[in-house]
Image (spheres, rainbow, N blue to C red):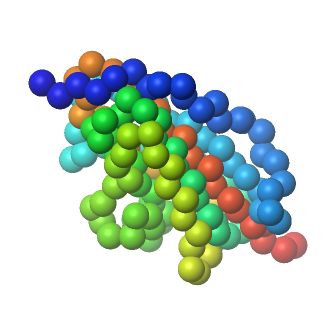
């Protein structure tokens, strides 16, 4: 039996886009049901704008107990964490990553894909992502 705890004090992700540090901030919350294994993760599309992803923050609330993971893909493959397969795993942690080279968002859909898993056999868990996108000049 593998059991964490319900998410403790979940951070509420705003649904509006706001200007932050010269980039547009996109906040996304992704809830994964219990019992989802890493070999068959839940996939969630994140629609952004044409531009460059230059920073990512991932919040893993207390209660995940190291039983969940999240990673981010584009059309070319996994972009963060850098090696495939690897995951952001934690409990009451914030991962803050600034890209050395901005990730271009040029394909027609301007989207990324988050993959998540949740080995907890009792509780659903939510990951909170903040993506900072510098718009492509028109």
Percent x, y for residue 132?
68, 59
Instruction: Using residue 5 as the reference point, say whether residue 18 is left or right of it.
Output: right
Instruction: Using residue 57 as the reference point, say whether residue 133 is left or right of it.
Output: right
Percent x, y for residue 111?
59, 56
Q: What is the residue that sits farthest to the bottom in this orientation?
A: 101
Percent x, y for residue 53?
64, 66
Asked where in the image residue 43 lies, by quadrant, the reply is: top left
Percent x, y for residue 73?
45, 60
One can see residue 52 in this view: yes
User: Residue visible at 78% across and 71% down?
Assistant: 136
User: Residue visible at 59% across and 69% down?
Assistant: 98
Asked whether 78 or 60 is in front, the reply is 60
Asked where in the image residue 27 lies, by quadrant, the reply is: top right
When the figure is inspected, residue 17 is found, relative to residue 13, above or below; the finding is below
Q: What is the residue that sits farthest to the left in this orientation?
A: 1
Name the quadrant of the C terminus. Answer: bottom right
Instruction: Using residue 2 as the reference point, say whether residue 93 is left or right of it.
Output: right
User: Residue visible at 12% across and 24% down?
Assistant: 1
When the figure is inspected, residue 109 is found, relative to residue 119, above or below; the finding is below
One can see residue 107 in this view: no
Q: How many marks?
A: 0
User: Residue visible at 46% across and 46% down?
Assistant: 93
């Amino acid at each position: 039996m593998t059991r964490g705890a319900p998410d403790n004090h979940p951070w509420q992700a705003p649904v509006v886009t706001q200007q932050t540090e010269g980039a547009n901030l996109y906040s996304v919350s992704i809830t994964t049901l219990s019992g989802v294994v890493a070999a068959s993760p839940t996939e969630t599309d994140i629609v952004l704008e044409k531009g460059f992803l230059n920073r990512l923050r991932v919040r893993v609330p207390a209660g995940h107990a190291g039983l969940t993971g999240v990673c981010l893909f584009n059309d070319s493959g996994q972009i963060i964490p850098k090696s495939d397969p690897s995951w952001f795993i934690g409990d009451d942690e914030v991962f803050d990553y600034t890209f050395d080279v901005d990730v271009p968002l040029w394909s027609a859909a301007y989207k990324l894909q988050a993959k998540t898993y949740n080995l907890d056999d009792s509780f659903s868990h939510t990951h909170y992502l903040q993506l900072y996108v510098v718009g492509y000049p028109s």
